[in-house]
Image: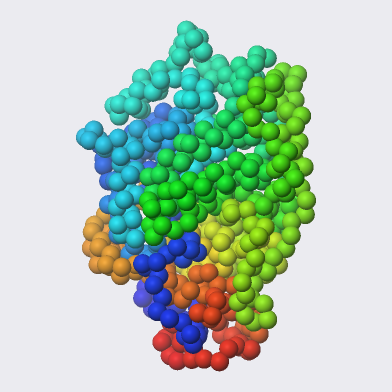
Amino acid sequence: MKKLAAKLWAVLMLMLVSMQTMATDTFTSNRTDFRDESIYFMMTTRFYDGDTGNNVLCWDNQSAQIETKDPCWRGDFQGVIDKLDYIKALGFTAIWITPVVQNASGYDYHGYHAMDFQHVDCRYQSSDGSKDGDAMFQELIDKAHAKGIKIILDVVLNHTGNFGEQTLCKEFDRDTDLATQALIDACMIPNEEKLGSDYLTSVAYEQYQRRLALMKNIRGKNQDVHNYWHHFGDFNWDYPNRWWAQIAGDCVDLNTENDYVADYLVKCYGSFIKMGVDGFRIDTSGHISRLTFCKQFIPQFTALGEKYKDKRLNQAPFFMYGEVCARYSDVTYRGQENLSCYYYTWQAPQDLLDKWDGSQSYWDTQVLFDKANGGTGVDDHQMALCESDNAPTPTSDNTFMVNGKWHEPDYSQASGFHVIDFPLHYNFGNAAAAYGLAKSGDKKYNDATYNVVYVDSHDYGPQQTNDQFRFSGDDAQWAENLSLMFTFRGIPCLYYGSEVGFRRGAPIDRGPHGPLSETGRAYFGGYLTGDVNASDFGDYKATGNVAATLNHDVAQHLIRLNKIRQAVPALRKGQWTDEGCTPADGGIAFKRAYKNDSYALVAINGGATFTDCPDGTYTDVVTGKK
């Protein structure tokens, strides 16, 4: 295995860095630019079980959970705390964790089906009762910060689950005793006045329709009188109506154009900013209009971030990036700019923002029904206003070196919001395809160096075979992709287990059909048993299974890449160009520069010839040769 690792390293990556004016980099103690980070993404409940006493079965598919001895709610905050040194040993500086708010659905271990935005899910509490979920989450934040690791919280602004929401439409009281959580009728106590005295004896479909009607006006009665949810029934990925349509039965679309709803969400998630989370990954951002983000969420979260900056590691600016899902081969989604990832990185037109009326007094005048009940589900003002935000975006050279040099970027039209690079992700079957797309598309983003880049995730893999499966490439393909991810523009992000090819090629998600162990969301904890102590990022001692995991060829490759990226500012936040770069056949070559402090030449999959480089002493960071 070590011979394979050495071969991968020598063939897949050669990098030369100019040290001409670069002072000692204070990376570990002064990370205030989020591009300095590399992100480890985990589903908390599937990562590591630190407290076996708070394991809980999901309500659906319980036979498979019992048969495999694998409760869906298995990993926990204690498990993340216990393995912080594992994350640090790999060299990652930030952890993105799935949503933590109280959930309610048949299969909600992932956290995307909220029923109470104000509290951390009770299934994360300590089993001895000494700490509730909020206290456990605060402990995780504090202990991560103590190790120099940042916490990115996944948040959902677009929807609730279908069991109502405790402030916007309370349909149930929740018994938060751990002993009741696996039994829906024991922990979910229905409001009979709203749901009917026969709710518990009704069939499941009828129960669902009653719950949904209170939020969606689907039975011809105006029950959501304040329009806290959207009532639009049609949905199409390829049209702006995805901004106000329900995307799934457990994702009831919130009316984020309503000031009351937006302010409530900001208040709830603002409490996590106050606790010290370092950034938000915002789920289903592509199902919210850019106008809504620029009017409602970006300015309010930015202000809260500034207010509570003392709570964050290094008092760094609060960072936000969104999931604008674009399963498509081009950077522009099916020819529609306003449905594309890059669109959200630009500020919306001020004249449209000035026309905004999200007041409750306005929304209280709207009586909206689903089409099945003779209505349109769409008001005549606010949604039309959002849809009118469709002007062509500007282009930018903020990502690129100009005339072979770094230049001061222009952020005068930036929205302050960044995105997961879905086009690159979708093309990451191999490094060449991803790199080729960036060459043609990076000018569309305000600054693509802030894009969060991954190969696969909890939802999709690249399109090279089938995007419903985790990346199926072998170690050499993983090494090639990671070599590009960690040296090219953008913030690298790794989905848990990919450091050892965990569940390579497995279906990512089958819902409540069969055991989780057969999917890309399987439990990873067996790979992490044993002890690990990290003295610094990438420097560690380990025993047991976790030592073998860290010794895997891909994990070792990651550790080296993280160390190199941390040592060279140009690789973290530099602009790039391929001018004056001639790679060998089949290879990739580019230059990167950051201010006057750091300059790098990168060649992947073979050698390269570089011309028009500044004078200076260049060090090969792989071999150490000057």
Choose top left, top right, bottom left or bottom right for residue 189: top left
Q: What residue is at 40 percent from the left and 66 percent from the top?
A: 30
Choose top left, top right, bottom left or bottom right for residue 174: top left
Q: Quadrant of the C terminus?
A: bottom left
**Spot occupied by residue 234 in the image (x, y as percentages of width and height):** 71, 31
Q: Is residue 38 above or below residue 517?
A: below
- Is any atom of residue 507 visible in this view? no
**Spot occupied by residue 66 in the image (x, y as percentages of width and height):** 34, 34
**Spot occupied by residue 225 in the image (x, y as percentages of width and height):** 62, 19
- Is any atom of residue 158 visible in this view? yes
Question: In the image shown, does 493 or 387 lie closer to the viewer?
Answer: 387
Choose top left, top right, bottom left or bottom right for residue 223: top right
Q: Quadrant of the N terminus?
A: bottom left
Display colour scheme: rainbow
Q: What residue is at 31 percent from the left and 50 percent from the top?
A: 142
Q: Is residue 536 above or below residue 174?
A: below
Q: What residue is at 54 percent from the left and 35 percent from the top?
A: 263
**Spot occupied by residue 611 in the image (x, y as percentages of width and height):** 63, 89
Question: In the image shown, does 299 or 488 lie closer to the viewer?
Answer: 299
Question: In the image shown, does 358 or 582 lie closer to the viewer?
Answer: 358
In this image, 552 relative to 22: left or right? left
Q: What residue is at 77 percent from the left and 54 percent from the top?
A: 392
- Count the numbered circles shown: 0
Q: Is residue 175 above or below residue 251?
A: above
Q: Is residue 60 above or below residue 506?
A: above
In this image, 53 relative to 26: left or right? left
